[in-house]
Image (cartoon, grey):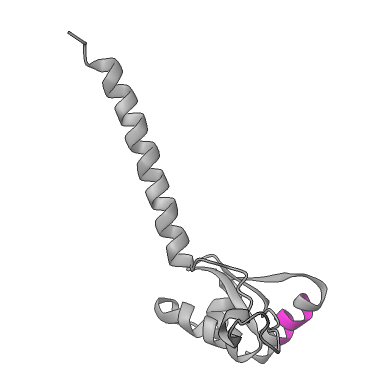
Amino acid sequence: MRTLLRQIKRELEKANHCAVYEEELSRVWPDGNQREPKVARFAQDNGFRLRFYRDGLCAIFDKEPERKDTPTDGQTDRDTHIHTHTHTHTERERERERERERRKNASRNAILSRAIPRA
């Protein structure tokens, strides 16, 4: 785990993100079924974030954004925390699935409108 930590830190010094692929992830966390929460916790504990995870593919880490120290313009400290992403991985997947369904339905409707004769 320390080797992986050093690798990620070294990469994040040079780049905005670091991808770690399945082969390396499986060495540290062999149980793939419960890996994502463990990887996210590892990232959080070490000062960076798990930005993307796909089981069997990779995990992408980036630096945790810095927090502003003092609230401004009546904002609470919680409001000033910088969130660079608005959706979790599962929300993005749901959005993609809904978009695929919309496209499939639009295509099906187009086919049906051509196949059904009008009176």
Q: Where is residue 46? Give x, y as percent.
A: 65, 90
Is the C terminus in the top left, top right, bottom left or bottom right quadrant? top left
Asked whether 50 or 76 is in front, the reply is 76
Q: Residue furthest front?
A: 74
Q: How many marks?
A: 0
Q: Where is residue 45? Give x, y as percent.
A: 60, 91
Image quarter of residue 114:
top left
Is the N terminus in the top left, top right, bottom left or bottom right quadrant? bottom right
73 displayed left or right of 28: right
Q: Residue at x 68, y 82 (%)?
A: 72
Q: Residue at x 54, y 65 (%)?
A: 57
**99 is higher (above) or lower (below) than 69:** above
Decide whether the magenta segment is chiefly helix, strand or loop: helix
Asked whether 82 or 6 is in front, the reply is 82
Q: Residue at x 36, y 32 (%)?
A: 106
Q: Residue furthest right?
A: 14
Q: Which residues are magenta?
A: 6-11
**6 is higher (above) or lower (below) than 13:** below
Q: Residue at x 58, y 68 (%)?
A: 85
**56 is higher (above) or lower (below) than 10:** above
Q: Where is residue 59? Give x, y as percent.
A: 58, 71
Q: Where is residue 30? Give x, y as percent.
A: 48, 82
Q: Residue furthest top?
A: 119
State yes or no: residue 13 in magenta: no
Q: Residue furthest left?
A: 119
14 displayed left or right of 84: right
